[in-house]
Amino acid sequence: MALVPFEIGIVGCGVAGQAAASFLADAGHRVTVLERFEQPHPVGAGLLLQPTGLAVLRALGLERDALSAGARIDGLLGENQWGIRVIDLAYCDLHPAAFGLGIRRSDLFDLLRRRLLAAGARLVPGVEIVDVEREGARAVALDRKAGRHGPFDLLVVADGTHSALRQRVFPRARAPLYPWGCICATVPDPLASGAVRLLRQRFADTTTMMGILPVAPDAVTMFWSLRTRDLGPERPLDLEAVRQEALALWPEAASTIERAVSGGEFSRATYRHVALPRSSEGPVVFVGDAAHGTSPQLGQGANLGLLDAHALARSLAEAGDLAQAMELFSRRRGASNRFYRSASHLLTPFFQSDSVPLAILRDLLLRQACQTPIVRPMLTGVLAGLRRGWLSAESLDTDGQYPL
């Protein structure tokens, strides 16, 4: 039996928060989204939506608009500094109709924001939530100016990797910074959605890494790996050094590199390895990167957040009370989130570290794995977001889509 309509507060207006707001408002709950920026906006340049994330957009009625805004991605190609193919994965190994979608964060943000407003959710900007207080069985969100919001029957925390509330609710939560992050910029490219529709990467040892992702019919996002200590907002970016190193690593990408550096509009991104003891505490539940932030090596952040949003609404619809709903949500999302958090953490040093031996091992093992018929589709399933654990996985349906 579905629960009676709840008063639900959502902290954060990112991918997970906006999707959750739409699903929960559609279900008849009274939803208030609390966002710290006066003018909510996306952070970052482009991202890759997997079949899992696309399935959630389909459930929200946004898939067609997303496909129009973005660029179809057929696979992942990664080469080392000598141009040797190390990673070569194709979605068609899972199903002939399967694919990913590169999209600007701004385009996805706009789609989700319009959707949450159309669903009837209330957006309150300019409110930075820094603490949570219990009021009986309900939760009150406290902002930096001592304002109180709520009480809410359920408070959904979706304030991202660098969550302000995580440590307040779970004092023993772990969320160390990864020592490497990246800068990224989106630039025009008339060939972005041409015949070769791939997320392409080039890496030298484990200290230098660049990626190019088509994110629109006429644009790509360039990613460049940097140490976290060089990504502080007070640190100026040495774009000339980036230009020279990138051209030396990937001369064939010169036009993209020159456009990105001359534009100078790079976003900075740092990442945390987030581990919570559980996803909820009483009337407070964590979703998205606030709950299970990872490095970007498996490209799952937005997809996991979208799946969290769908699973949360579904769990509330099927449960008899809030405690049961939280248990259902944990069972639905726990295994997959734990796998991708752990797998990303294990994979990261092979691409971002100071270990030459790990680079050699990466090039040998991944190259062989991608050429092995049994192993290759398993790796593609990891990329596509289908793993439920180290020994279990889900499958695409007969149409090549992820069944929610």
Image (cartoon, helix red, strand yellow):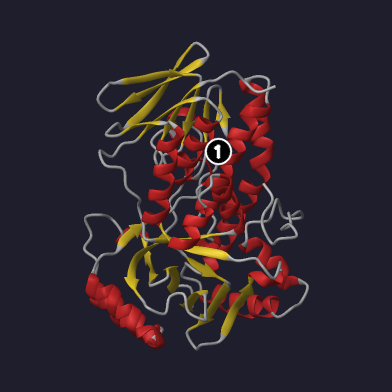
The residue lying at 50 percent from left, 89 percent from top is 82
Residue 304's x, y, as percent? 56, 49
Q: Is residue 389 above or below residue 220?
A: above
Badge 1 amino acid: Leu
Q: Nearer the viewer, residue 181 or 313?
A: 313
The residue lying at 65 percent from left, 51 percent from top is 339
The residue lying at 69 percent from left, 37 percent from top is 331
Residue 220's x, y, as percent? 39, 71
Q: Nearer the viewer, residue 190 or 250?
A: 190
- Identify the residue under disc 1: 276
Q: Which of the 4 image quarters holds residue 13?
A: top left
Horizontal side of 392 relative to 370 (left or right) equals right
Q: Is residue 228 above or below residue 309?
A: below
Task: Categorize mark 1 by other alpha carbons within 10 Å: few (<14), some (14-19), many (20+).
Answer: some
Horizontal side of 285 relative to 183 (left or right) equals right
Q: Which of the 4 image quarters holds residue 38?
A: top left
The answer, for residue 290, to whether it is visible in the render is: yes
The residue lying at 53 percent from left, 32 percent from top is 26
Residue 298's x, y, as percent? 56, 61
Q: Is residue 232 above or below residue 156?
A: below
Judged from the image, the secondary structure of the residue bearing numbered disc 1 is loop
